[in-house]
Image (spheres, rainbow, N blue to C red):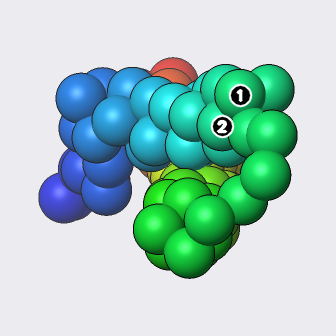
Amino acid sequence: MQRHRRRNTPAFTVLAYFTLFAGVSLFCIGLYNADALQLNENGYYIAVMILVAVGAILTQKVTRDNAEDDELIAEQERRQNLNKAE
């Protein structure tokens, strides 16, 4: 029987969470330092909001995939334990 392999490595999971938190942090720092927004600062905010959006989507995907993988691996281990008991 083939064992289910996790779709995401721990490094990819950490990178997903880091991307989300880095984007939110950069956005908050930018808002704190903003007095009067110039055109180049608007571009900065657009870039950071894209980073936050990508980070949020990536974090959601990684979290969902890890939860599904945990369920699949637990089910495989239950089946193996039942086969060994027989």
Q: Residue at x 24, y 29 (%)?
A: 11
The percent coordinates of residue 62 (x first, y second) are 52, 52
Q: Residue at x 56, y 75 (%)?
A: 39
Residue type, label 1: Asn
Say if 45 sits above or below 69 in the image.
Answer: below
Question: Could you say whether the residue bearing mark 1 is in a helix, strand or loop?
Answer: helix
Say if 10 sits above or below 54 in the image.
Answer: above
Position of 65 with respect to 5 (left or right) is right
Residue 80: give its label. none
The residue lying toward the viewer, choosing from 27 and 15, is: 27
Position of 9 with respect to 37 (left or right) is left
The percent coordinates of residue 51 (x first, y second) are 50, 60
Question: Could you tell me which quadrant the N terminus lies in?
Answer: bottom left
- Give neighbour class at mark 2: few <14, some 14-19, many 20+ (Cα, 10 Å): some
Q: Are marks 2 and 1 in contact (CB under 8 Å)?
A: yes
Mark 2 against mark 1, which lies toward the viewer?
Answer: 1
Residue 30: give its label. 2
The percent coordinates of residue 57 (x first, y second) are 61, 67
